[in-house]
Image: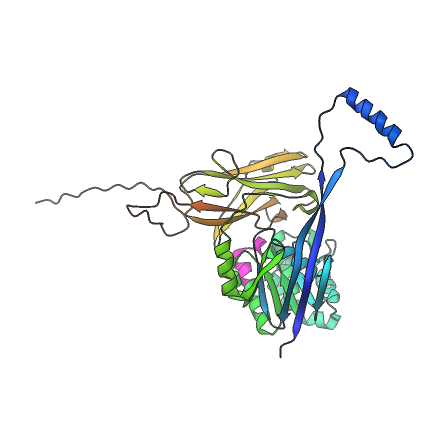
Amino acid sequence: MTDTVVRVENLSKKYIIGHQRQEKYTTLRDSIANGSRNFLKGFGRKKSPENSEEFEEFWALKDVSFEIKQGDRVGIIGRNGAGKSTLLKVLSRIVEPTAGRIGIKGRVASLLEVGTGFHPELTGRENIYLNGAILGMGKTEIQQKFDEIVAFAEVEKFLDTPVKRYSSGMYVRLAFAVAAHLEPEILIVDEVLAVGDTQFQKKCLGKMEDVGKEGRTIVFVSHNMAAMRALCSRALLMHHGQLLLEADIETAAAQYLADDTGADARIVWHKDDAPQSPEIRFIEAYISNEQGNYASTIDCRKGFSISVKYEVLKPINGLRIGFFMQNLDGTPICGSNDPMAWPKETRDPDEYISQCNFPGYILNAGKYSIYFGADLPPYNKSLVTTPYCLSVIVEDIEGYGPMHEKLPGVVRPKLEWNVNQLIKKT
């Protein structure tokens, strides 16, 4: 009988979110009068300001229960805000649950986000040994895997360089290589692989498949349904912090794709959990139609815009903002960056909005997901990336031909044709 390696019982995680009350306009006379009253009323006790912060409870997870057997390859799917990443952080013991119980049998290696698990001041070599020690491995055991880790990560030239100088691609390659090769019983991988190039993603999926064949357990979060179907046999479908369905991957994916008709036209990040680096913090991102309104559904004949608002935290030269788009099956569609003239200029601390405009007749009917990133010249140093955080549904209202059928493919350009009759010579 296969052993249960992960048992989750009635797991819940609550966050307290603060909201600043809206300040109302007051005159100088009102401020002086209110201040005097508050001083007299509050003499000898703690003052409670009128414009204090209000708090609300947010349940990222609510009464989640499931079991994972040894050797299972389990995908966790769901829309943004479903609780997927929070669940992985609790399983990885990064955050404590508010209620419920978790039982884990075996060593766990997690790859959740760029920057997790490595000490930035240590070299790549030192971090390999550090992570192995954290997993409870001895020096000899780590040395046996060392060459294999370095070869997989392709960072031989930078092995003795502090990882804080690595590009995001190098960082993720090494982090994944360490997590996958140091033989944990349970491997947990989040959407972080999206920052790697396509060849690297294929390489990682192949390695995870090998890990699964060795009888080790994999827990995988991704918006890429093609990768999910290729790697996982079971799936947990999450919705608003609750476990909606536990089933085989095809059943869960079919329900996710059938129910996931909505789209996320706007996301606003709270200051505490915003994607950020010492140089930049993302504030919000949104999709808008030609009228400038938030829009989760776009007529394929009409143009639309993708925008991201961010705060530059200190003067920075050469900052570049970009996005990447894929369709619902995980097929890459396109990416773009803001103008390359920026390397000649410095962006001073302030808030900015970078906007990319799409013309009409470019995307075919379907649903598309988007994530954002910021980097510096020579544009191999990523400052920060977001998960896939926006989605838009493109509808083909017009159709094509007398039957108004949907054209195949990803793009839907309106092309000009010329037809000329060739008169045969007699």
Quadrant for residue 138, please give it.
Answer: bottom right
Looking at the rendered image, the quarter that the C terminus falls into is top left
Residue 51 inside the magenta-drawn segment: no
Residue 200 x, y percent position in the rendering = 55, 59
Please state which of residues 248 and 199 is positioned toward the viewer in this rendering: 248
Q: Which residue is at the far left? A: 426
Looking at the image, which residue is at 68% across and 62% down?
A: 10
Q: Residue at x 67, y 68 (%)?
A: 7
Residue in front for this viewpoint, 50 or 277: 50
| Span colored in magenta | 193-203
**Magenta stretch secondary structure, dominant:** helix
Q: Can residue 156 be seen here?
A: no
Q: Determine if residue 369 is in view.
A: yes
Residue 237 lies left or right of residue 273; in this view the side is: left
29 shown above or below 90:
above
Where is residue 206 drawn, in percent x and y?
A: 54, 66
372 vs 35: above or below: below
Percent across and percent down for residue 406 are: 36, 49
> Residue reaching furthest right?
44
Q: Residue furthest front?
A: 41
